[in-house]
Amino acid sequence: MKNNTCKQELIQGTSLSNEIYVVEKVIGIGGFGITYLASNKKLKNYYAIKEFFINGYCIRNSQAKDVILQGINEDIYQKYRKKFFEEAKTLSILNHPNIVKVIDVFYENNTSYIVMPFIEGQTLQCLVDKYGKLNYETSVNYIAQICDAVAYIHQKDILHRDIKPDNIIITPENNAILIDFGSAREFIQDKTQNHTSILTQGYAPLEQYSTISKKGSYSDIYAVGATFYFALTGQKPMDATSRTIDKMSSPKQLIPNIPENADLAIMKAMQLKSENRYQNVQDFVNDIMENNISENHHNLQKGIEKVVIIGRSADNDIVINDLKVSRHHLQIIQDETGNFYLADFGSTNGTFVNGKKISGEINLFPNDVIKIGETILPWNSYFSQNIKKEEIYSQNIRNETYLNTGKMPKSYQRLAIVVLFFCIVPLGIFLTLPDAIKAYKIKDLYLKGDIKAAQALSKRIRNGIIWSIISAVMFWVIIILYFFNQII
């Protein structure tokens, strides 16, 4: 007999783990667990606590917190509870900004609990359900972040096995976080393994329908491609088993303005035969990120009033000579209504607006402060009323190197070089040379018995040598900084 799990969760105010955590509300119910929002009153922090609770086979007396089994053998229950603990073990060894972390694990109420930080935001599934399909720039940003997380777990020989929009949380800062490692298993690439068949139709490849099959990184890549398909089209992909009979529409057939290369990349990732898919995540990322830069360069043709592309490479509209700035770092867009937007191209060191790291596309406001690398961008000047994009070049903006935060003006930098080179270096020589010439007299002074004079002269020569070394070091530092373009 099945039971309605909505009546089986812990009530608000329930204490857990020796009253460390207090249940606030239920935030999710799945087939193998209930997730609660919980607080720690002492630390004033919020957490997501996942309780092992098998839907339909566990009940809870309304007067007690203990989980009671119904219609399931104790051994089977403990077997699945052990797998629940394995999820915690898997997560505990992972440390990646796009993967949820495990803080605590404990046993209580005849079941187990995993404590994780509460991530504010909503799932990708909820985002698309609420607002409809996402544009290409937004989608590719989220997928690129998830690919980074997937590449990381694959390096540790772990398959997620359940990547889907419901298992990706999008934060208010547009960070994509991969959650729910309950199906994760260690794997050996292309080896036949016996894994429990756990899957989500539409996102699982054919090999996941078999408990004994060859699995590899390409299995998760299928799910990533399917998730990208959903984000771009707003439609769940066709189930892999159904695709053996019927043909699935490509993303571009559903949404014609999707870039062709992105369309091809998704369909390759979702090939039914694993050998025809991408064999590592980075190859997939390279293709979709190439689309992103290419597509953003063509946004001028799509009703946008003005676009300024910024980065370290000489082919940008604004060239920032800063080693912490990516070759193509970001773009700032002004639309026909006068609104401004900023889109990061998935840069290495990120883009910060008002001190917060952003990703994807966000709205910009006149007083917003943008920082990339060590450089603060005077972005408002790029969109002055009377300046068109073509005229930016004549105003020497295209090749201007903006001053790095905290560095002195260039005129002072050059003055500092003159002082260092023409004052300190000669000073070292001046202090050293006269005494160095007299070095031969030390022996004579010792022979005459004038030990104090000999020691004083020896000390002056030693100090002079130290000055010479300091002068030489400073000279080479100036030369190195000059050639690496950090001062000039």
Image: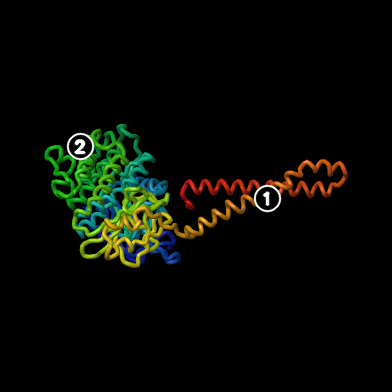
Rendered location of residue 175, percent (x, y) = 33, 55
Residue name at image x 47 percent, y 47 percent: 484
Q: Residue 166: x and y, percent?
A: 26, 53
The image quadrant that residue 449 belongs to is top right
Q: Splitting the image into 4 quarters, where does residue 188 fall?
A: top left
Query: How are the residues colored?
Result: rainbow
The secondary element bearing badge 2 is classed as loop
Of circles 1 and 2, which is in front? 1
Answer few, some or many: residues within 10 Å of disc 1's Cα (few below 14, many 20 plus, some between 14 and 19): some
Q: Secondary structure at mark 1?
A: helix
Which numbered dot is residue 147? none
Q: Is residue 77 visible?
A: no
The amino acid on which the numbered mark 1 sits, given as a three-letter code, is Phe
Residue 204 showing in the rendered view = yes
Three-letter residue code for mark 2:
Leu
Q: Which residue appears at 64% of the width and 46% of the height?
A: 469
Q: Which mark is residue 430?
A: 1
Closer to the chain start, of discs 1 and 2, is 2
- Quickly name the residue at label 2: 272
Q: Residues within 10 Å of mark 2 (few under 14, many from 20)?
A: some
Q: Is residue 228 left or right of residue 320?
A: left
